[in-house]
Image (tube, helix red, strand yellow):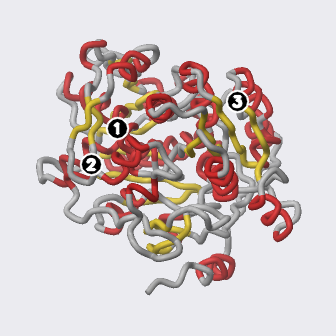
Amino acid sequence: MADTTKIPYKIYLEESEMPQSWYNVRADMKNKPAPLLNPGTHQPMTAEELGGVFCEELVQQELDNETRFIEIPQEIRDFYKMYRPSPLVRAYCLEEKLQTPAKIYYKFEGNNTSGSHKLNSAIAQAYYAKKQGLKGVTTETGAGQWGTALSMACAYLGLDCKVYMVKVSYEQKPFRREVMRTYGASVVPSPSETTQIGRKILAEHPGTTGSLGCAISEAVEVAVSNPGYRYVLGSVLNQVLLHQSVIGLETKAALDKYGIKPDMIIGCAGGGSNLGGLISPFMGEKLRGEADYQIIAVEPASCPSFTRGVYAYDFCDTGMVCPLAKMYTLGCDFIPAPNHAGGLRYHGMSPVLSQLYADGLMEARAVPQTAVFEAAEQFARVEGILPAPESSHAIRVAIDEALKCKETGEEKTIVFGLTGTGYFDMVAYEKFHDGKMDDYIPTDEELTIYRAKLPKMD
C-alpha cells in the first residue's frame, strides 16, 4: 500500500485559514481579456449599460482589471463557513489501483447541498442583488448545479429566483429540478413559449433539445423586462471566475501547508468557472514568473470550444441579445449533442481563460463521452465518490497522465478539480451501463457552418 504516514488522506484548512479576499488574476495578466462589446455599436460596454442587466457591484467587479485582491464581505464569508474550507484529498486508493508513481490530489467541491462549486459565486451574486434592494434574479442552468446553488442562495437571502433550464437536462434530471423548486425557484425548460426569444428559437429549430446559449437569452429577456430583477450568470464572466478563486486559494494553501508543489493542474472546462477558480493563484505565480505549472483544460469532444473553436468576438447567447465577448467559440448558434455533461454544453469559453490559452499559458484536451464515464466509474469504485459527469472529464485526463507516469517512471504531482457529485445523473450512468451511450463528435463541415455566422467586426 502507499505510504500514508506523512500526508493525510484529507487536508483540511482551519476556519481561520479561509481566504479573506478573492484573487483577481486579471491584475497579473500582461494581456488583459478583451472587453465586452455593445452588440449594436461594437464599442466597449460601459458600467451604465451593463448595469441594466447585472447588479451594480458585480458590474464593477466585471470591469476591474487592476485590483489584485477584492475583499470578501463578512456576510459571504459567514455563509461560506457552512461548507468551506472544502477538503483537498490525496487519492491514495486510485494511485494504488493504477500502480502509478504519480501523486494524485483532488479538490472536492461537492460537500454542500447544491452538490458543486457553483455555490461559491451564487451566494456572492445573490448577496449583491439583495444589497442593491432588488426583488429577484433570473438565470440559466445546464445540468442544474448552478440553478440549484442560486435557488439555495436566494432562499437564504429572501430573493425570488427564476431559472431557465436547458430542456434536455430538464428532462434527464427531474430531481435536480425538484431541488430548485424545494428552495422556492421557478424552473422552466428552455427554449420555452414564455419568452419572445424562446418562441423564435423553437420556430427556427423545432424539437430542439436546447443549449445554455438559448437559456441565457430567455433569462436575460425576463430580467430586463421585469423591474426589480437582474440577470446573474454561473460561469464565463470575469466576476464569476473571481468568486471561484476561493477554490484555488484554498488548494494552494493546503498544498503549501505540507510543502507540496504540483506539476500539473487539471480541470473540466465548459464556460470556465471552476477551472478559472482552481488555477487562479497558480496561474498568478506563472504570470509573475515565480513558478511554472502544466495547466490542462478538459472539454467534451461534442462541444470542443478550445480545441476546435475560433478566437473571435461572438454573442454570449443564442438569441443575440447579450454583449459580444472575445472568446474561443463554436458560434452562438451551435447547439451541442445532448450529452450528459450538461454544465459543459456551452458554445464559448471565458474571455479570461481564452486570453490565457491564446497566450500559450495553458493547454486544452477534448475527450469523448464514453471514455469520461469509464473514468467516472473507475474513480467511484476506488475513491468512494460518485463524480458528476462534468468533473469526470478532469478525472479522465488525470488518470491518463498518471498512467503515463507509470510508463515513464516519473513521480509527478497531479491536482485536479472534483467539482461536484453525480447522484442526480443516474440516467446518464444507466445509459453508460446499458451500452446506449454514444460519442457524437461534430464534423468540420458542421463547425464551418456555425463559424460563418460569427459577427462581422469592423
- Mark 1 and mark 2 in contact (Cβ < 8 Å)? yes
Left or right of 442 on screen, residue 119: left
Label placed on residue 25: 2
| Residue plotted at (41% across, 30% down) | 107
Please, which residue is most extreme toward the bottom here? 458
**Mark 2 / mark 1, whichever is N-terminal:** 2
Can you give x and y, in whole percent of width and height, for residue 37 in the image?
44, 69
**Mark 2 / mark 3, whichever is N-terminal:** 2
Q: Is residue 101 visible?
A: yes
Q: CA distance from mark 2 to mark 3?
A: 33 Å
Query: How many discs mark residues in the rendered view?
Result: 3
110 or 133: nearer the viewer: 133
Name the amino acid, label 2.
Answer: Val
**Image quadrant of residue 211?**
bottom right
Circle 3 is placed at which residue position? 185
Q: Is residue 369 visible?
A: no
> Which-is-in-front pick, marks 2 and 3?
3
